[in-house]
Image: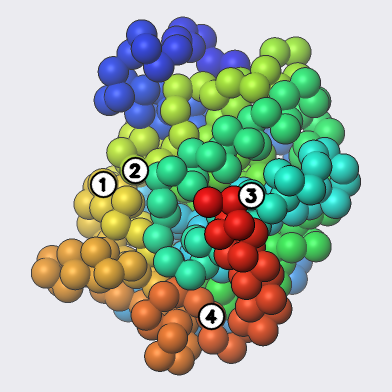
């Protein structure tokens, strides 16, 4: 989707680019909720674990959830990359880079800007020239193959509690808005705010609208959506695992730290924010890996990725 007034990073300040990215994400998210789609009945039927709040029937309240390591184990863009590789969108060398980035994300439990930018640039070059509709269709398949089993049940239950209270629930993520929209739809959520890749006549150009929806840009997206939907941010909730999302968490009246990294945990405790940690085991508490789900499968791939990285250094 191309936004009016798109300018290159050299012509706008970082703050202006964040605002542009946030406004573009809000516009894309609202547009996606107006398009017809099928409902995932399984998501609607799941049992909800009721948190300390929300308030039933408060239509001016909404909930905003970060995606990577908050709603889903790992990073959506890396899972999406695996699916594209399977469909021969790129070569084995690029897959190795995706594997290393995913291993780093899972082991460190933090969003490293260099790795995230590398993954983003790779994704943009891969999708350039492809139709948006084609990637959306493939994204549905990739969700079933690589993402569906990586949803944190606890966080999903929190989102369902807001839905059951009659509130809107939105994903807010640096992942591509198309991917985020698919995940939100499958989970029965209201919609998604994500990074908007520029497209002309339904074809990706290989550029972004503004900048990735990360850090301050997420807060701008939430602010723009709240204005459009008449939400009272003091009555809204936000959930994230990363200190990078402190701007978004600080924007609402009910911030939650979910599976928090060390910096966010410290910040949340100082401000007496609510915390939820769905990771299990001592190792999970240290590095953010789900000890009971998928560690065995991850280990082999992680060792191979680290070995490959070391050989290249």
Q: Is residue 17 left or right of residue 78?
A: left
Check disc 4: other Cα within 10 Å, few if <14, some if 14-19, many if 20+.
many
Q: Which mark is residue 3?
A: none
Label 2 residue SS:
loop
Q: Which mark is residue 97?
A: 3
Q: Which residue is mark 1?
A: 247
Is residue 208 visible in the rendered image? The answer is: yes
Cα distance between the residues tagged 3 and 4 = 22 Å
Residue 287 quadrant: bottom left
Q: Which residue is mark 2?
A: 215
Cα distance between the residues tagged 1 and 4 = 26 Å
Q: Earlier in the sequence, mark 4 or mark 2?
A: 2
Residue 156 point in image, percent of width and height? 55, 70
| Circle 1 or circle 3, nearest the eye | 3
Q: Is residue 67 left or right of residue 15?
A: right
Q: Earlier in the sequence, mark 1 or mark 2?
A: 2
Residue drawn 18% across and 64% down?
Answer: 267
Residue drawn 45% across and 91% down?
Answer: 281
């Amino acid at each position: 989707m191309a936004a009016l007034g798109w300018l290159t990073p050299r012509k706008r300040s970082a703050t202006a680019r964040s605002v542009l990215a946030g406004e573009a994400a809000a516009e894309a998210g609202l547009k996606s909720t107006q398009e017809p789609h099928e409902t995932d009945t399984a998501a609607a039927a799941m049992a909800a674990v009721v948190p300390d709040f929300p308030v039933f029937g408060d239509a001016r309240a909404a909930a905003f959830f970060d995606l990577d390591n908050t709603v889903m184990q790992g990073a959506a863009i890396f899972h999406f990359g695996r699916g594209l590789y399977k469909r021969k969108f790129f070569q084995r060398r690029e897959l190795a880079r995706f594997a290393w980035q995913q291993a780093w994300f899972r082991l460190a439990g933090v969003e490293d800007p260099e790795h995230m930018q590398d993954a983003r640039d790779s994704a943009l070059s891969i999708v350039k020239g492809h139709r948006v509709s084609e990637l959306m269709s493939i994204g549905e398949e990739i969700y079933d193959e690589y993402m569906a089993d990586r949803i944190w049940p606890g966080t999903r239950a929190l989102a369902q509690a807001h839905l059951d209270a009659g509130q809107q629930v939105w994903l807010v993520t640096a992942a591509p808005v198309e991917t985020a929209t698919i995940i939100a739809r499958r989970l029965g959520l209201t919609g998604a705010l994500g990074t908007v890749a520029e497209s002309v006549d339904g074809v990706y150009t290989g550029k972004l609208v503004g900048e990735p929806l990360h850090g301050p840009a997420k807060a701008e997206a939430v602010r723009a959506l709240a204005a459009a939907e008449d939400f009272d941010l003091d009555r809204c909730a936000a959930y994230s695992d990363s200190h990078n999302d402190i701007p978004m968490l600080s924007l609402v009246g009910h911030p939650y730290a979910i599976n928090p990294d060390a910096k966010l945990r410290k910040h949340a405790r100082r401000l007496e924010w609510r915390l939820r940690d769905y990771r299990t085991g001592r190792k999970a508490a240290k590095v953010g890996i789900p000890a009971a789900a998928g560690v065995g499968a991850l280990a082999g791939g992680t060792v191979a990725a680290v070995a490959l990285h070391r050989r290249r250094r």
